Amino acid sequence: MKAAELPRHPIPKSAVTTCMLAYIIVAKFCDALPLYRQEKILARYGGSVTRTTMANWLMRLSRQLQGLINLMYDHQRTGRVINADETRIQALKEPSKAITSDKYMWVTLGGPPGQTAVLFEYDPSRSKEVPLRLFEGFSGYLQTDGYKSYDAVCRQEGITQLGCFDHVRRKFTDAQKGETKPGKKVKGNKVSKADVALGKIRKLYAIEEEIKGLTAAEKKSADRKTVSHCLMTCTSGYRKTSPG
């Protein structure tokens, strides 16, 4: 007698099915269900899988998937633009760091138009060493919120830094909130510099909304025709109306 060969499994000698692994991954990383909640959900259906077991499955699976993750990082670098941001995250067992201290999830999006990849890289540090590792060998455009830790890798790799209009807009919004509003003691309805700046940004946002479904080439063509016209005309348009 000859036994049939078992199908290949990402975690050898494990009792978990690939469908179960997919469910745990989607529930944790897409639906924000921590493993302890998944443990309780499974228990209600008669399951007895502990959070420790699920965590071990995910850690073993991550080692199997590391090659794919490396390929995705390489794929990101084939594009001209990478967007990056670092978000605070809580990690309970991080050596030499308190439970309440800040750790970070570094998120990057990049790759050729229409074939972009999103990657999450956990690191307890927010230092320049993380971008130096993540963007080694990249020489295009890097768009961030302007955090100084990205400066070193941009100098080293010859990367062109891009800013973020949303972060710029916040400063003008703060300035607008601090302005004295027209009333009985304030005559006139003068449009401030903050109002003019926000008007220009709103015009640019409107263009982005109109062209978001176009291809990269179509967006480039549309930008040439509309952005310069927007910047020339929006100031006069907002001088004729009240701020808003």
Image (cartoon, rainbow, N blue to C red):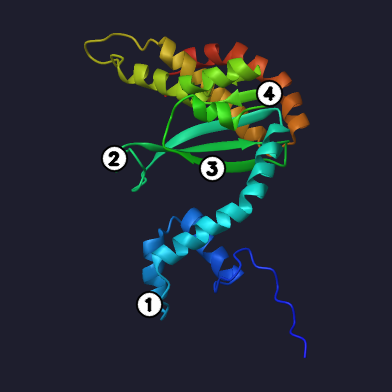
Quarter holding residue 207: top right
Of the pair 124 and 234, the residue shown nearer to us: 124
Amino acid type at image mark 2: Ala
In the picture, measured across the screen, residue 198 lies left or right of residue 67, that is left
At 32% from the left and 38% from the top, the residue drawn is 97
Q: Which residue is mark 4?
A: 140
Determine the secondary structure under disc 4. Answer: loop
> Who comes first in sequence, dot 1 or dot 4?
1
Q: Which residue is mark 3?
A: 120
Find the residue positioned furthest to the front: 1
Which dot marks residue 114? none
Q: Residues within 10 Å of mark 2 (few under 14, many from 20)?
A: few
Q: Which residue is mark 2?
A: 98
> Who comes first in sequence, dot 1 or dot 3?
1
Label 1 and label 4: CA atoms lie apart by 51 Å
Residue 162 appears at what percent x and percent y? 58, 20
Determine the secondary structure under disc 3. Answer: strand
Of the pair 194 and 185, the residue shown nearer to us: 194
Label 3 and label 4: CA atoms lie apart by 20 Å
Label 3 and label 2: CA atoms lie apart by 22 Å
Q: How many marks?
A: 4
Q: Which residue is mark 1?
A: 44
In the picture, measured across the screen, residue 149 lies left or right of residue 92, that is right
Amino acid type at image mark 3: Phe
At 38% from the left and 10% from the top, the residue drawn is 190
Label 1 and label 2: CA atoms lie apart by 34 Å
Q: Residues within 10 Å of mark 3 (few under 14, many from 20)?
A: some
In the picture, measured across the screen, residue 231 lies left or right of residue 30, that is right
Amino acid type at image mark 4: Gly
Amino acid type at image mark 1: Arg
